[in-house]
Image (cartoon, coloured by chain):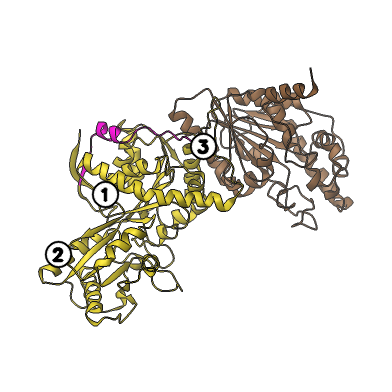
Amino acid sequence: MELNELFDEYFEESHLQGGTTCCPGCGGPLFWRMALEVLGPKTIIYGDGPCAGCAIRNIKLPTYSIHFSFVGDGSTGIVAALAAKGRDDITVVSSGGDGAIGDISFGKISAAAERNENMIQICIDNEAYMNTGIQKSGLTPFGAWTTTTPLGKEAPKKEIPMIIAQHHVPYVATVSVAYPRDLQAKIEKAKEIKGFKYVHTVMPCPTGWRFNPAKSVEVVRLGVQTWAWPLYEIEDGVLKLTMKPKSRPIEDYLKTQRRFTHLSDEQIQFVQNEVDTKRQRLIENDGKRIIL
Amino acid sequence: MSFTRMMEGNEAAAWGAKLSRAEVIPAYPITPQTELISHIATLIAEGVMKAEYIKVEGEHTAMAAAIGASAAGARVFTASAAQGIAYMEEALWMPPGRRLPIVMCMVNRALAPIGGLRPDHNDSLMQRDNGWIQLYCENSQEVLDTIIMGYKIGEDRRVYLPVAPCYDGYFVSATATPTTVPAQDDVDDFLPPYVHEMYSLMPENPRAPPRAMNMAKARYEVQKAHERAKTIIEEVDKEYEKRFGRGYDGLLEEYACDDVDAVIMTMGSMTGTARDVIDEMQARGKRIGLLKMRGFRPFPTEELQELVKKYHAIGVVDRNNSYGSAGGGVVSMEVARALYTLDDRPLLLNFHVGLGGSDVTMRQIEYMADKTLEAVETGKVEKVIDWVELLDLGEVM
């Protein structure tokens, strides 16, 4: 078989076409390659304009977008149209970035969760407005440099998955492209559940986080291993840690990215304490119902 | 079965949506539109109407859900007013460019801060540039009929544009007038199911209009669709009249215009009042007629140019204002542009009334008609822009 035929076959099966407009090392195309394998061809993908929209551009399934201030609501319309047509064989996936979900479309996501819209809502979280040139969002972590937080962000990252879980939705999960099997198992589970499913992934961004694009997977793997980005799922309100790595110092993660180079030892210690507290609480509540 | 009874504009609109078999209704309440969406909710709850009703958390979402549903192949209906229209403005630019034939009632209400809950036309008129077809309705019956016609117009493959039937809050939305609700079978016969030839999001057969690489060309396509829509609106109106016995003369209606020297031009609910005033004045021998502006978008330029040849003066009644504009209200500025290319054009007067939702009285209409006739007699316009409400006009006519 010729090499190009191999590629053709691959792109046919993966529901992707060759090429991407994303930056080198972006986690977006990687995420979709993994997700589409389990989502299958009967899927409509709705997504926003900037980075998260860029990541769905080479998908060979029906995609639709409006603008990043419309995450969760355009897809609500698609879900309603499918219901009106009696099409229950199609999975609707709505995708948004951290700026959309954490900031401008936050109310939209909350309302879609409250209405329990039958869709999988993905958060492609690269922790800042990267498409406009690295500006702080509500999901930028404490201390991170961006062009609008030149001295580092003062406030912590919003805990969106936990906030969504409090809407009594059937399924919430955090995933990482460094753990493909975990990621695919969670997407597969989300596909089988009716109602609003929320899957949040912190996405490596060499452009905005300032690291070598070849190291993308390593960087986010460190994020999981240091508990900066713990992997869990919340099914019917019950928390389950799906990855419980032996903790590594947060500094191992922070020092891989130049957005954190200005942090003082004291600030690093502060981040470590925050991560430790969060880890401890997660472990304490593992297997327990955590929604009010 | 067709039936006739007294009905408020909002209830008539709900019946319009029901008879059109709207499949998805994303809506958010705002006075004076609220009864409309409550009526729809009731029709659905009673099993009279079958639709996916999405109780969204704001107008921005209402229009986004409308866009998603329309692109996914559903017939969509929604409605808003004033601040709601302003809030959804970002989304309102999408359906024309995406060629999605959504129908949304704009229940006119004055915008904050210098307004109340009552109507003026600035809320819908500020959306004049974004590509929505705007048809202004005078009473409940026209609202119901225009919604059904709106789908027929917007879903025509030569058009593919969203349509906004606009009607005044309270004066139309909450005023009961005799309304005939046609039989579902007859409407089904008139309005076939929605099929968009350019769009499908269904995985078995996806298709989409090509992405615009030349922005000017893509915008020109929307402009051409508007120009074609003028003919389609006339066609649909004639077909509707033939089938249901009611028509609205397309974009522009002449009322009592035989053998008159001048006309006043009105839009929306004030037209009903103006009809009575004109009848009364003609009975007194005054040579004044009435033009009802029904279609503001697309603007009936050629039709207007043809009609005004017969008149020496035209008094445009603007229930809106544009601060610091070149002169007068939005409608009068458009009329001025339409008349400018005529060699022999009538005198043009502009009156501001009903701003911020105040009532347009018979006395005010009589005053405006008199002023227009006065211009014919003297051959000149004394006051180009007249803020009628600032005058003390004395006794009610």
Q: Which chain is yellow?
A: B
Label 2 Cα crowd, 10 Å radius (few <14 / some 14-19 / many 20+):
some
Residue B142: mark in rendering: 1
Percent position of residue A1, x then y: 79, 17
Q: Quadrant of the N terminus of chain B?
A: top left
Q: Give the range drawn in magenta.
A: B179-198
Say which element carries label 1. helix
Q: In which quarter of the image is residue B138?
A: bottom left
Apparent side of residue B265 relative to residue A259 in the rendered image (left or right): left
Percent position of residue B173, x then y: 29, 52
Q: Quadrant of residue B37?
A: top left
Say whether marks 2 and 3 touch (CB < 8 Å).
no
- In the rendering, what colour is chain A? brown
- The residue lying toward the viewer, choosing from B61 and A173, is B61
Tag 2 residue: B279
Tag 3 residue: A76
How many badges with numbers are in the image?
3
- The residue lying toward the viewer, choosing from A124 and A236, is A124
Instruction: State whether discs 2 and 3 lie on one chain.
Output: no
